[in-house]
Each structure stands twice: as structure tokens, then as C-alpha cells.
Image (tube, helix red, strand yellow):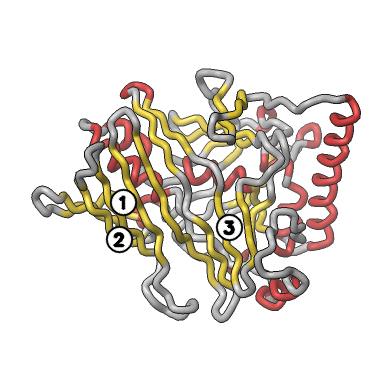
């Protein structure tokens, strides 16, 4: 694993680590000894069915990356340009199938026993990859996950929906995410499960995907399956979707029976490299790789006391800022996005600027 530490001018330090990818070489790097015993100890006083949203994890259970970074990496850390493929499709159906493939590519293998840092309010992640500029901002204190403890497993439901807009085609694609199942006993493991719906109101096309783990209590079995269908506004099935999200996924044309591969995980999410800092002075203090740099360094060096103190300092500062805002009767306002409440009871966000500027951190093309 490569770690990049640059930009120490004026106290700014950036720590970047290799993204999650198809290879599993990061497992041993981040996993501490006796991880299962430590996890059981962590949950010994937690009742089944409990919401774990406010459970404070020590750095032993973190890897050196923010959840905000993980979301960003699922977009820009690909070995093939899947987003351009979405935009370059000649027909609406071809573009839709490419969007389905891109959505599947954001599903990455995870590491049992560790999770990313929970982003702080106002945290940002700004990265460029070729002509693609990505900017994320944490706009809510509330985590996007709702983890619940079920005795021998933890299930995390990812709330909210993602939107992908192809502006030159006038098409918007809306999709949810699968659930994360962390199995503790009898055999530890992490799998994605549940249903994902992808829809485009402008074309009427819809995909229904199901992430399946067929293993029995974690023993062997055929895992990481994905099955589904793509149909039009009249509910006519156009394609049948089948495969494994960590291998290949195919679509079968129901008209002529032809089968083709729309997603190859080895081609898309293997051999991913650590992003680099091109302009250290241009990195914002709110950048994820800056906010969590001290704690990340502690984790990488397995200096758990340093990691704990650094993480506590970040979280205590956030509590202090929150109390100050409350005392002044102020409401925090995002810097890069406009947040509005939706009719469904949730909220929507839209960027303030039309274009994202090039970033000081770059990912390899």
C-alpha cells in the first residue's frame, strides 16, 4: 500500500491511501490482532435490534479514510472510464445499460472489522481525474447509514438516493444503494445484499437489481451474486441481468437471446493507485485527507493512542463548534451546495457552482 504525505506548509498535512479495490491486499494492513474477539467485546452490552448510529468506535475499528472519501473513490477510482461510456451511448437503452454498469462498479469489496471515519460537518473531498472534477461536501450531521445489531450480525441500511445527470442528453438517473451485511458469527464476513432500483423518468426505463449472498451461515456458497431485469415504461422486460458484482455482469436481450458483458470488475476496479497531491498549497483545510491526517497516521503506524487522541480532538472540536452555533442561534450553511427539503420528507442538494474547478489532488487515469 502506498501512502502519500505532502503539504505540510502552514500546518497542512495530507494523508492519502490506496483506494478499496478488487484486490484484497489491504485486509492484513488494516486488520488488528484478535479482531473478532475485539468486536465481540464491543457488542457485549448491546442488545439485538439496537440502532448503532451513536456507537462510538475506537480507531482500532477504523481504516485511514473518511466515508466521504469512500463515496468519492467509488466515482473516480476506476481503471476504465465508465462515466464517459454512459454519456457516449448512441441510444437511450445503451446509455441506461451503461449507467447500470456504473452503478454496479460503485459496489466495492470491504474489509471485515474496520470502517471509515464518520465525516464531520463541512468536510470536503476535492479530486480530479483527467477531465473529471469531483467535489463532495458533508452537509448533514446525521450519518447516511442506519446500522442495527442482530445478535450475530450488523445490517447497515444506506439511506438516500443518488442522481446521475447526463446534461447533454437531458436524462437523470436515480438509484438507491444495497444494504451492507456484516456477519460476525459463525464465520466473519462482509457482503452487500438487498434490492436496488435505477430509473430514468425521461426515457421510462427502469432496472431492478438484487444483490444476493447464497452462502449458508457464511460457509462457502456462491456469494456476491447480482440478478435483475431492465424494462421499459410498459413493463416489457428488455434485458435480463445476471452475474457477480466482483466478477462479470451480463445482460441477455429478451428479443433475440443474445448475451453480452456490460461490467467486468477486474477491468474496472483492479490495480487502482493512490491519488497524489499536485498542488499542496491548494488543498483546503476541510479536505478529508487533512481533517483525519493525524488519526490516519496513527492507524498506519499502529500507534493507537495517537490515533485515539487525534480522532477525539476532531470530534471534540466539532461539538464545540456546534455548541457555539446553538448559543448564537445560528444554523450551519453548506459552502458548496444548496440543501432543500423534498416533498417526500427528506432533502435534496444541488451544487452552487455550475462547474467543479480542477482539484489539487489528482487520481491516475
Residue for point 47% across, 35% down: 129
Is disc 2 placed on a helix, strand or loop?
strand
Mark 2 or mark 3: which comes first in sequence? 3
Mark 1 or mark 2: which comes first in sequence? 2
Q: Is residue 340 left or right of residue 45?
A: left
Mark 3 or mark 1: which comes first in sequence? 3
The image position of residue 32, as x and y in percent, is 68, 70
Alpha carbon separation for disc pair 3 and 1:
25 Å
Q: Quadrant of residue 243?
A: bottom left
Q: Nearer the viewer, mark 1 or mark 2?
A: 2
Residue for point 89% across, 25% down: 328
The image position of residue 144, as x and y in percent, is 61, 46
Residue for point 51% across, 18% down: 354
The residue to which callout 1 is attached is 263
Q: Nearer the viewer, mark 3 or mark 1?
A: 3
Is disc 1 placed on a helix, strand or loop?
strand
Alpha carbon separation for disc pair 2 and 3:
23 Å
Q: Is residue 206 left or right of residue 110?
A: left
The residue to which callout 3 is attached is 156
Q: Is residue 244 left or right of residue 145?
A: left
**Number of residue marks:** 3
The image position of residue 171, as x and y in percent, is 34, 27
- Camera-side residue: 74 or 233? 233
Q: Quadrant of the C terminus?
A: top left
The residue to which callout 2 is attached is 243
Q: Nearer the viewer, mark 2 or mark 3?
A: 3
Residue for point 63% across, 34% down: 137
Alpha carbon separation for disc pair 1 and 2:
9 Å
Amino acid at each position: 500500500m502506498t501512502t502519500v504525505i505532502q503539504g505540510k506548509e502552514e500546518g497542512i498535512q495530507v494523508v492519502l491511501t490506496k483506494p478499496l479495490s478488487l484486490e484484497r491486499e489491504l485486509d492484513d494492513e488494516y486488520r488488528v490482532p484478535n479482531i473478532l474477539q475485539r468486536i465481540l467485546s464491543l457488542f457485549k452490552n448491546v442488545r439485538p435490534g439496537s440502532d448503532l448510529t451513536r456507537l462510538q468506535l475506537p480507531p482500532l475499528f477504523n481504516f485511514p479514510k473518511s466515508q466521504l472519501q469512500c463515496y468519492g473513490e467509488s466515482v473516480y477510482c476506476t481503471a476504465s472510464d465508465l462515466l464517459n461510456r454512459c454519456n457516449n451511448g448512441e441510444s437511450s437503452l445503451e446509455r441506461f445499460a451503461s449507467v447500470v454498469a456504473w452503478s454496479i462498479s460503485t459496489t466495492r469489496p470491504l474489509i471485515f472489522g474496520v470502517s471509515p471515519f464518520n465525516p464531520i460537518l463541512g468536510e470536503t473531498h476535492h479530486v480530479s481525474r483527467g477531465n473529471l472534477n469531483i467535489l463532495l461536501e458533508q452537509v448533514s450531521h446525521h450519518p447516511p447509514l442506519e446500522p442495527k445489531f442482530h445478535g450475530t450480525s450488523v445490517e447497515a441500511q444506506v439511506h438516500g438516493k443518488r442522481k446521475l445527470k447526463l446534461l447533454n442528453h437531458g436524462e437523470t438517473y436515480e438509484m438507491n444503494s444495497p444494504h451492507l451485511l456484516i456477519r460476525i458469527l459463525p464465520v466473519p464476513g462482509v457482503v452487500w445484499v438487498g434490492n436496488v432500483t435505477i430509473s430514468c423518468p425521461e426515457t421510462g426505463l427502469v432496472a431492478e437489481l438484487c444483490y444476493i449472498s447464497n452462502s449458508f451461515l457464511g460457509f462457502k456458497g456462491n456469494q456476491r451474486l447480482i440478478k435483475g431485469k431492465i424494462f421499459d415504461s410498459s413493463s416489457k422486460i428488455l434485458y435480463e441481468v445476471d452475474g457477480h458484482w466482483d466478477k462479470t455482469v451480463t445482460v441477455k436481450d429478451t428479443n433475440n437471446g443474445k448475451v453480452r458483458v456490460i461490467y467486468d470488475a477486474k477491468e474496472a476496479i483492479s490495480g487502482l493507485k493512490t491519488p497524489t497531491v499536485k498542488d499542496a498549497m491548494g488543498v483546503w483545510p476541510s479536505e478529508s485527507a487533512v481533517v483525519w491526517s493525524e488519526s490516519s497516521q496513527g492507524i498506519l503506524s499502529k500507534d493507537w493512542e495517537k490515533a485515539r487522541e487525534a480522532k477525539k480532538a476532531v470530534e471534540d472540536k466539532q461539538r464545540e463548534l456546534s455548541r457555539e452555533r446553538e448559543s448564537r442561534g445560528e444554523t450551519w450553511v453548506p459552502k458548496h451546495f444548496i440543501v432543500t427539503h423534498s416533498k417526500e420528507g427528506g432533502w435534496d442538494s444541488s451544487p452552487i457552482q455550475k462547474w467543479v474547478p480542477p482539484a489539487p489532488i489528482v487520481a491516475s487515469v
